[in-house]
Image (cartoon, helix red, strand yellow):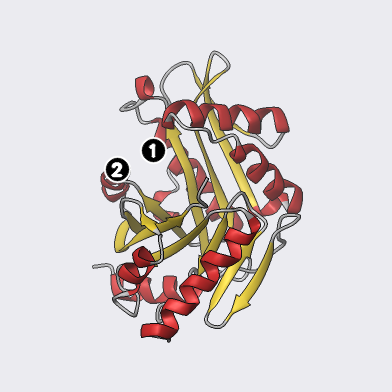
Amino acid sequence: MVDTAALLAVYDAQMRMPPGGTLPAGVTYEHDGPVVRIVGGHMGRIRAPRDVGVTGAALDRLIVRQRDYFQARGQGVEWKFRAHDLPADLPERLVAAGFVPEDPSTTLLGFAAELATEPVLPAGIVLRQVHETDDLRRIADHQSEVWDTDLSWVTGMLLSQVSADPTQITILIAEADDRIVCSAWSLYYPGTEFAALLGGTTLPQWRGRGIYRALIAARAQDAVTRGVPLLHVDASPASAPILRRLGFHAITTSTHYHWTPPN
């Protein structure tokens, strides 16, 4: 029996606040009381400990300061809230300040050694690790197509990670006749036991053939090779059942609250 409470404790200790390592060019961490602003990406991000440590009017002022800071930059900002965070009324205070919640994701952890099986791909599919700008642009186009929204910023985000330190990211694509059918990447955080699995996206006509599972296995193998024992995913409702079947363990849920500047 897996001790999910122990996994949650490790996650809270290592994965809540911005990690160490080499930051992409232009990205900085700014502290404001208990929270950290991540500044310089395509949008702002707020990270906080499990218990923000302030309540009531003081919490409202903290939230408004983050919103107003990024409004002055002409940027949106995201505040990530987990289901076990405190104070419990933080979500309603975020909404009162103009933040809008996305659908919750399931936070899952897996043991890399258990998941590092040999990737099994359908005939005609080739799996490649990439880092060149042209491939990163193709990934952004692929993700924009699947999600039917402009994700062109993904090119710059991936490129900035590769340029900052290529050892902190692994980017994979599965191709059929030179067309990307699935893309995904892993981020590594020096000083932690985790690799974060991100970006897993498959063209609709290629789903149900095991390609997403193959990219999970390949990234687990990569983590084992690096001596990283734990995998973290914030999974969508579509991905969470697949990951559970593979052996991931749900520890909480996370919800991204977004504030977008008015036109």
Q: Position of residue 230 (x, y in %)?
A: 46, 61
Q: Residue at x 69, y 52 (%)?
A: 167
What element does badge 2 sit on? helix
Q: Is residue 66 above or below residue 58?
A: above
Identify which amino acid the numbered label 1 is placed on.
Arg
Name which quarter of the figure residue 59 lies in.
Answer: bottom left
Q: Which mark is residue 29?
A: none
Q: Quadrant of the N terminus?
A: bottom left
Disc 1 vs disc 2: Cβ atoms closer than 8 Å?
yes
Residue found at x 46% / y 56%: 259
Instruction: Return the residue found at the far top.
Output: 177
Q: Is residue 30 left or right of residue 222?
A: right
Pointer 2 local density, CA inside 10 Å: few below 14, some 14–19, many at least 20: some
Q: CA distance from mark 1 to mark 2?
A: 8 Å
Q: Is residue 207 visible?
A: yes
Q: State the residue position of label 1.
A: 213
- In the displayed image of the protein, which residue is found farthest to the front? 263
The foreground one among 177 and 17 is 17
- Residue visible at 51% across and 45% down in the picture: 219
Assess disc 1: are there few (<14), some (14-19) or many (≥20) residues with their C-alpha within 10 Å of its C-alpha.
many
Query: Is residue 3 among what the camera can see?
Result: no
* Residue bearing the label numbered 2: 242
Asked if 80 appears above or below 34 in the picture, the reply is: above
Looking at numbered disc 2 in the image, what kind of residue is underneath it?
A: Ile
Q: Secondary structure at mark 1?
A: helix
